Amino acid sequence: MALDATTATAGPAMAPARPGLTLQRFARRRSTIAFLMALPLITVIAGLVAWPAGYAIYLSTLNRRMTSFIGLGNFEILLDSETFLMVIWQSCFFAITAVVLKALLGFWLAHQLHHIPTKGQRIWRGLLLLPWVVPPALSTLGWWWMFDPSYSSLNWILNAIGAPSVPWLGEPWWARISVIIVNVWAGTPFFMIMYLAALKSVPDQLYEAAAIDGATGWQGLRYVTLPMMRNIISITVLFSLIVTFANYDIVRVLTNGGPRDLTHVFASYAFQVGVLAGNIPRGAAVSLFMFPLLAIVAFFVLRGVNQRSKEMA
Amino acid sequence: MAENGVTRRGVMRSGAGVVAAGTLAAPMVHAQGTGGTIRVAFWDHWVPGGNDALKQLSAKWGEQNRVNVQLDFINTTGNQLQLTAAAQAQSRQGHDAISLTPWDVGAYADQLEPVDDVIQRLVAKYGPINPIAEYLGKHGGKWRGVPATSGTQAKPACVRLDLLEQHAGIDVRAMWPAENKRGPNADQWTWDTFLKAAEACHKAGVPFGLPMGQFSDAVDWIGALFLSYGAQITDDKGNPTIRGNANLRQAVDYAVRLSKFLPGDVWAWDDASNNRALISGRSALVFNPPSAWAVAKRDAPQVAEKCWTVPMPAGPAGRFLAYLPYTTGIWAFGRNKNAAKQLLEFLGQRDSAELTTNTSGGYDIPPFASMADFKIWETQNPPTGTIFNYPLKDHHQAKYAVAYSPAPPELASQMYIQALNTKVIARVAQGGESLDSALGWLEREINNMRRG
């Protein structure tokens, strides 16, 4: 068989190549079939991801009226803005804090679930997945009612037990914490379900061997569970980091970036600058700002995953 | 490829147009006519049934002119209307005419059909259009849209008569009766009086419900406050006028002092928070169109019957009333521009404007001063005459104001959306910055916005 994965076909081995047969052979190549089968997905990705991303990059190089090319001018202007520098800091704080909390909570929940007997596990799994399943704009609205500046139900409960009201959305740090709480609440089930799947795939024999060697529970976690879950942890954290950096709805519904822009993240600020204030090129620049950094992070994380996969194979 | 008639740009235009036009597909087809079809996107009114006037009027005009009129009502919740306008402007496809929020006329000026002929005929009949509607609707010496009645609002003070009299000793109904004249103490309705009343009501546990966040209600009333102190943060070219601006310092200082007598969470209030504060009976005063009172009438009649609308207080530079007009623009790429012009001219007639205002319960304000005498503002109740002073009238001796005027619209829209005026106050009052530091930040932000 040829190295290009051409499939063996019945028929005279040395028959002269005729046009019809060449086309037939081409259509029966594995790579051709694979390409054709992947074509719908490639089309979707090209149309809904690659083209918009390319167009956004193009837009970010235009002036406000979109009449002339200014290169990286929009990025330069943004870096001169105190508000945008604050947005960078806040986006990083928001994304990193939320992802770390989601990962820790998700890991803990996955462990708890893993140790529940299979029969009762299903209902807990379903219940714990609910925050992730509910549309975020809707669930955030529920949280907003709980955090409402004047009529917060959480404050009502706090007051009922004699505690003072908390300015959930009115004071900068509380507002940041509120945004992170909602993101963690909505995103933890994703980590939990991924980690649970990973935990289930760890062979019991490894734990048995570790136990025979006298490993404690902590050592089992440190030297068996975590190494076996390393790939899934890397991919989950990377995926969540990208999604959390791009988060829009929670900030938009809860705080609209306030007070004093102190809860804006890239997406909410990009929408405000680009669509609401009519400066589409600068809005595009805001939304693209983290793209190079996240692309580099993604490259290294995925390379590590590939290397580990090869080693394990 | 181009000869085949299917180009990348064509496909994208069609796609974006379909998405934009399909946001709220509620087509109504009137009259099987020969005058073609026009599609118009109007703002979806807050007031229940508030769209009925436009439906009736468009149907009537369509029948008279044998034109099929298709209307879509698109709301501003989640900025749907602004997104639709942005998508249509990008794809150069969509409705023939569309309601535009105040600053969008300037943003899309070069894509909007001049309507000077329509304006000239309307002005000849009804007198001048108010200067703010002109500032927002006229660009490069040409009118780029027809100032609309539907959706256009002012934000005077909606006062709890009983609470202000009880705690601050001010009878606002005597000051501003439901007549075309000022009451005996109307001249004393100043920001200084207002500050004392705010302090008294704060002490009494019914603080004024004035938002200080980043939503339009907050930006609008602070904009009017600044202008009443003669405080402009840029000139008409967009150059910052912050350094050495004593009026601006005075206005910010006043707002910081006032903020101490407001609820502690006003920095996070949205456009509904002040309504809730009034309706719940926890606030003695808000700046709002009559929608807050109208909801109170339905949900808390005991509150509504004690509400009275009065102009905003006056400052050293005069009395200004926060004003937020809608404008209907006709896209230059529209297919039936002449019919759209005729429809908008018809909607601008006094009878049409009065029906629109009546249907909205008095919420909508026409752009002509000569139309500030509609009967509905006298008769709405309880108490009768409660919104008599809602639209600006001659005896108010006031002017309509929009925040950040006279800045060029493309700069003003950015400052408005980013709520620079409330943020500069918040930096001092909430963030603890010095006034100089906050004003320095303001100047740098404006200079940054002007670049590119």
Image (cartoon, rainbow, N blue to C red):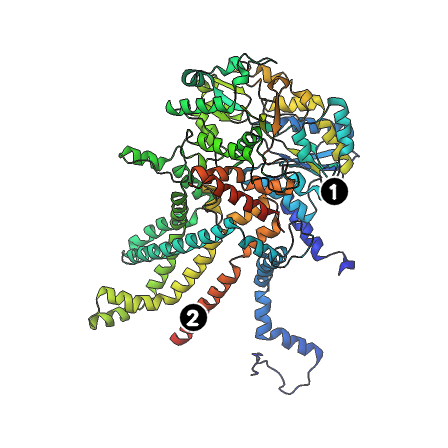
Give the chain of mark 1. Answer: B
Horizontal side of B99 relative to B197 (left or right) equals right
Q: Amino acid at mark 2?
A: Gly
Residue B297 in view: no
Q: Position of residue B207 (x, y in %)?
A: 42, 26
Crowd tier of the residue under label 2, counting other residues whose Cα lies within 10 Å: few below 14, some 14–19, many 20 or above: some
Q: Position of residue B206 (x, y in %)?
A: 40, 24
Q: Nearer the viewer, residue B432 or A262?
A: B432
Q: Residue furthest front?
A: B244
Horizontal side of B308 relative to B398 (left or right) equals left
Horizontal side of A134 relative to A165 (left or right) equals right
Secondary element under disc 2, as helix, strand or loop, is helix
Asked if marks 1 and 2 fall on the same chain, the answer is no
What residue is shown with label 2? A304
Q: Quadrant of residue B104?
A: top right
Up the image or down, B188 lies above or below B443; here it is: above
Mark drawn on residue A114: none
Please state, as top left, top right, bottom left or bottom right, where the N terminus of chain B lies in the image: bottom right
Residue at position x 38%, y 59% in the image: A194
Secondary element under disc 1, as helix, strand or loop, is loop
Q: Amino acid at mark 1?
A: Ala
Q: Nearer the viewer, residue B208 or B372?
A: B208
Q: Nearer the viewer, residue A3 or B301?
A: B301
Crowd tier of the residue under label 1, counting other residues whose Cα lies within 10 Å: few below 14, some 14–19, many 20 or above: many
Residue at position x 62%, y 86% in the image: A13
* Separation (CA) of disc 1 from disc 2: 55 Å
Residue B7 in view: yes
What residue is shown with label 1? B332
Residue at position x 39%, y 54% in the image: A97
Give the chain of mark 2. Answer: A
